[in-house]
């Protein structure tokens, strides 16, 4: 039945390829691909297919930061000016915690008026940040929540400054290699990546290959590639608290509402630290979506129910991936079935 549901989701959303993992009590119960990783060469999608995972990678960036917090190297309340030079005056009150919880007030460079004009250009990090350095803050740090790619870009620079390693090497040394996540790497279109999926779009009802999208505009805000097979290992490390202490993970998965504007009882989700805490009544649920040209991704962890769903696909117009994850989880955990009252198909 789960296969029928996933096939229906793919048909309704015109998804070329989709890979799914379901992990229950730390053990995989479904790790499978559906459809096509590459249509031109008739390559099926499998559990080993490698996708661009976009902002799901922010969970990796946040984990690296929290590793340094655990080690006493940095504090969540440290200002970013402790580690970065030439920061705009308006950004100086911003702390690491403000960034992790999307409460910095710094405008996201992906919202810049000319952003889509530069996505095909391989720019320096300073050129990317220049898209927003002259703009005022959207609000004073800590007052509100607003999704902010710029902050996570800055976290990558902070990590490099503190450790002396490149962001990609740091990910490999501290997370990917120890966990055996051999397919998870930083993305660059020039690299030869085994099992890499092609990304697709549907402009004007015609399936086309995604255009070039420079890795310089993703970096630590979501520039990773991964497979659901690898992400099972990531989920097991979170479930068993081998990558961070349980107390640290609990802190990341706790709502961190700003001073103004966020009402937990009314909102669908509130920022944690590197994760979004989903409001499913009295259940603890955390998640993160990812969306980039040609790809969409989601990881949803139903903490109290000990089940996690991971979805990667090679189409960027998939909506309600969190609802899809909840519906899939309901197949394996009956107490979750009510979270998705109807199959979250197109226009639902």
Image (tube, rainbow, N blue to C red):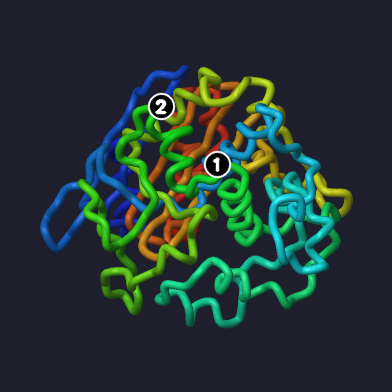
Q: Can residue 283 be seen?
A: no
Q: Quadrant of the N terminus?
A: top left
| 327, above or below 188, in the image | above
Q: Give the secondary structure at mark 2.
A: helix
Of the image marks 1 and 2, the number of the one nearer the N terminus: 1
Q: Nearer the viewer, residue 22 or 167?
A: 167
At x 30%, y 55%, the residue is 11
Residue 291 is situated, as x and y percent measured from the top left of the image, at 47, 58
Q: Residues within 10 Å of mark 2 (few under 14, many from 20)?
A: few
Tell us which disc is closer to us: 1 or 2. 2
| 270, above or below 109, in the image | above
* In-image side of 298 versus 90 (left or right): left
At x 44%, y 31%, the residue is 234
Q: Which residue is mark 2?
A: 178
Q: Which residue is mark 1?
A: 59
Location of residue 24 by image quarter: top left
């Amino acid at each position: 039945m789960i296969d029928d549901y996933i096939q229906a989701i793919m048909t309704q959303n015109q998804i070329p390829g989709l890979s799914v993992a379901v992990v229950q009590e730390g053990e995989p119960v479904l790790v499978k691909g559906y459809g096509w990783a590459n249509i031109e060469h008739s390559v099926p999608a499998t559990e080993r297919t490698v996708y661009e995972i976009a902002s799901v990678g922010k969970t990796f960036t946040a984990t690296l930061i929290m590793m340094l917090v655990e080690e006493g190297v940095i504090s969540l309340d440290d200002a970013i000016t402790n580690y970065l030079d030439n920061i705009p005056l308006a950004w100086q009150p911003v702390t690491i915690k403000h960034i992790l919880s999307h409460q910095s007030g710094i405008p996201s460079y992906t919202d810049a008026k000319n952003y889509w004009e530069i996505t095909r250009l391989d720019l320096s990090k300073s050129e990317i940040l220049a898209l927003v350095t002259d703009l005022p803050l959207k609000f004073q740090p800590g007052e509100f929540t607003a999704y902010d790619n710029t902050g996570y870009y800055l976290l990558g620079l902070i990590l490099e400054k503190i450790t002396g390693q490149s962001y990609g090497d740091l990910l490999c040394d501290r997370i990917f290699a120890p966990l055996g996540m051999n397919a998870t790497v930083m993305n660059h279109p020039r690299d030869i990546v085994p099992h890499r999926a092609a990304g697709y779009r549907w402009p004007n009802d015609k399936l086309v290959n995604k255009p070039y999208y420079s890795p310089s505009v993703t970096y630590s805000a979501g520039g990773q590639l991964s497979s659901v097979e690898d992400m099972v290992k990531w989920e097991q490390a979170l479930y068993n608290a081998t990558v961070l202490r349980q107390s640290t993970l609990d802190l990341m998965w706790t709502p961190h509402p700003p001073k103004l504007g966020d009402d937990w009882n009314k909102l669908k989700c509130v920022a944690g630290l590197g994760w979004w805490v989903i409001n499913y009544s009295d259940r603890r649920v955390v998640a993160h979506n990812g969306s980039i040209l040609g790809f969409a991704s989601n990881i949803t962890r139903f903490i109290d129910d000990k089940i996690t769903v991971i979805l990667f696909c090679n189409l960027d117009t998939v909506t309600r991936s969190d609802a899809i994850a909840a519906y899939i989880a309901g197949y394996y955990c009956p107490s979750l079935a009510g979270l998705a009252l109807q199959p979250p198909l197109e226009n639902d």
